[in-house]
C-alpha cells in the first residue's frame, strides 16, 4: 500500500487519535458518499485499534450509501447522546457545515480532515490538502500511519468516496496514483459492482419525473458559455422527491458542449436555495462560490442563497459574468 502524498505530516492527527478516550466522527450536513465513506472507513480503522468510537451526523444517510458496512451505526439529529473528548470532522469546509451548535465543540479537541481548498481551518488540528481527489483518499493515506491494513469494509467505504467525488473518475484530480489506489481497494475487497448498482442504478421512477421537469427549465446564457437548471420547492413536493433525488442533475448541465460554467439551483425549503456550480478551465467556480459565502474546489463548488428564484438568478448572473471574463 503506497500513500498518495508521502510529504503530508499526519503526526498531530495520529497522536490525538491514539490519546483519545472517546472519539466522535461527524460528517457534514446533507451527507454525500465522500463524507460518509471517509467517516465509515475511519470508524472501522479506529474500531480495529480498540478505540471507543461512535458516528453521529445531523442529517440522515442518503439511500445510495445504505449498502456500506456499518452505516446502520450512524446516529442522527441535533442531540448527541454519547460523550467524546475528540471529534473528527471529515470533508466539511467550515464549522457551520457540520450543522451543530458551536458550543458542542468547546470542550473537545476538534480534528478537521478535508480536501477543499476553501476550508476555514476551524479545528484544533487541521489536515487540509486540496491535492487529494476526495477526503476518502486522505483516510487511505492516514491508515498506514495508524498501522491499519485495508480490509473489505474500509476499502468499500473509501471506494464509494473516490468514485463519487471524482464523478466516476472523470475529473482532472484523477491521476495514475489514484488509479493505483483504487486497484489496492479492489484487491482488499471493495465490490465495484455493488457500488455501481447502489450509487447509480437504484433510483426511484419518480426521480426521472423530477428530472423531466428540471430539464424543461434548462437554459443557456452568456452566448452558450453558461447553463442553468433549477428545481423549486413546489416541484419537489409535487413529485414527492427531495434534494437527495436531484443529486447528479448538474452533470447533465455540465455536459453541454461550449458550456464553461454550469449552475443548478434547488430550493430545499421556501426561499432557501442550494447552489451547485461546475466549471471548466479556466473558469474557477470555487472563487465564485466563496464570494457568495460558500466554497469548494476550483471546478466544483457550491453555496446557499435566499430569496425568490428571480432574485437569486439575477444575483448569480452577475457573478457568473465576472467569472467568465476572468
Image: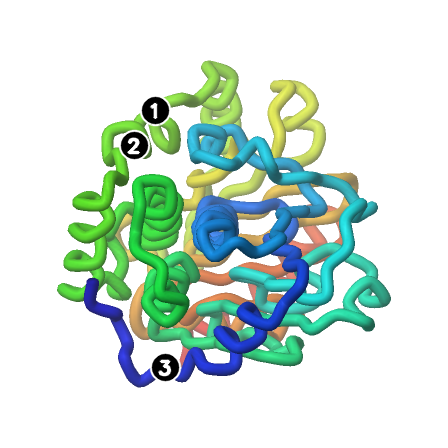
Question: For the residues marked 3 and 2, what is the alpha-carbon distance in whole angstroms?
Answer: 31 Å
Task: Quote the CA–CA distance across marks 3 and 1.
Answer: 36 Å
Of marks 3 and 2, the one in the foreground: 3
Secondary structure under tag 2 reads helix
Q: Nearer the viewer, residue 143 or 88?
A: 143
Discs 3, 2 touching: Cβ within 8 Å: no
Residue at the spot of label 3: 8
**Residue 325 visible within the image:** yes
Q: Where is residue 316? Give x, y as percent.
A: 60, 62
Instruction: Give the residue drawn at x 49%, y 62%.
Output: 301
> Residue 201, which numbered label?
1
Location of residue 12 with respect to 84 vertically, above or below: below
- Where in the figure is residue 50, as x and y percent of width and height? 52, 54
Sort mark 2 into few (<14), some (14-19) or many (20+) by Cα contacts within 10 Å.
some
Q: Please identify the residue farthest to the right as the structure is shown.
A: 103
Would you say 128 lies left or right of 269 here? left
x 37%, y 41%: residue: 153
- Which mark, by number, is residue 196? 2
Q: Residue at x 24, y 29 (%)?
A: 193
> Left or right: 318 with respect to 234?
left
Amino acid at each position: 500500500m503506497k500513500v498518495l502524498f508521502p510529504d503530508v505530516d499526519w503526526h498531530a492527527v495520529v497522536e490525538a487519535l491514539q490519546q483519545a478516550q472517546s472519539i466522535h466522527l461527524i460528517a457534514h450536513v446533507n451527507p454525500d458518499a465522500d463524507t460518509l465513506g471517509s467517516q465509515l472507513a475511519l470508524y472501522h480503522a479506529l474500531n480495529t485499534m480498540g478505540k471507543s468510537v461512535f458516528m453521529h451526523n445531523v442529517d440522515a444517510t442518503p439511500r445510495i450509501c445504505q449498502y456500506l458496512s456499518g452505516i446502520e451505526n450512524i446516529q442522527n439529529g441535533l442531540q448527541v447522546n454519547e460523550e467524546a473528548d475528540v471529534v473528527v470532522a471529515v470533508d466539511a469546509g467550515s464549522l457551520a457545515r457540520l450543522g451543530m451548535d458551536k458550543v458542542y465543540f468547546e470542550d473537545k479537541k476538534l480534528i478537521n480532515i478535508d480536501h477543499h481548498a476553501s476550508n476555514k481551518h476551524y479545528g484544533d488540528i487541521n489536515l487540509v490538502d486540496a491535492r487529494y481527489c476526495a477526503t476518502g483518499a486522505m483516510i487511505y493515506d492516514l491508515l498506514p500511519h495508524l498501522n491499519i491494513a485495508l480490509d473489505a469494509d474500509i476499502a468499500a467505504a473509501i471506494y464509494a468516496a473516490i468514485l463519487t467525488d471524482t464523478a466516476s473518475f472523470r475529473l482532472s484530480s484523477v491521476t495514475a496514483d489514484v488509479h493505483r489506489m483504487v486497484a489496492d481497494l479492489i484487491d482488499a475487497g471493495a465490490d465495484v459492482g455493488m457500488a455501481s448498482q447502489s450509487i447509480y442504478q437504484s433510483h426511484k421512477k419518480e426521480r426521472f419525473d423530477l428530472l423531466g421537469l428540471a430539464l424543461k427549465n434548462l437554459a443557456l446564457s452568456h452566448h452558450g458559455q453558461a447553463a442553468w437548471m433549477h428545481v423549486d420547492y413546489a416541484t419537489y413536493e409535487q413529485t414527492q422527491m427531495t434534494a437527495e433525488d436531484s443529486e447528479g442533475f448538474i452533470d447533465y448541465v455540465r455536459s453541454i458542449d461550449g458550456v464553461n460554467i454550469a449552475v443548478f439551483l434547488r430550493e430545499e425549503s421556501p426561499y432557501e436555495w442550494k447552489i451547485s456550480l461546475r466549471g471548466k478551465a479556466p473558469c474557477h467556480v470555487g472563487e465564485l462560490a466563496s464570494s457568495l459565502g460558500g466554497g469548494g474546489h476550483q471546478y466544483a463548488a457550491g453555496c446557499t442563497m435566499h430569496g425568490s428564484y428571480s432574485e437569486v438568478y439575477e444575483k448569480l448572473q452577475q457573478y457568473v459574468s465576472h467569472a467568465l471574463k476572468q
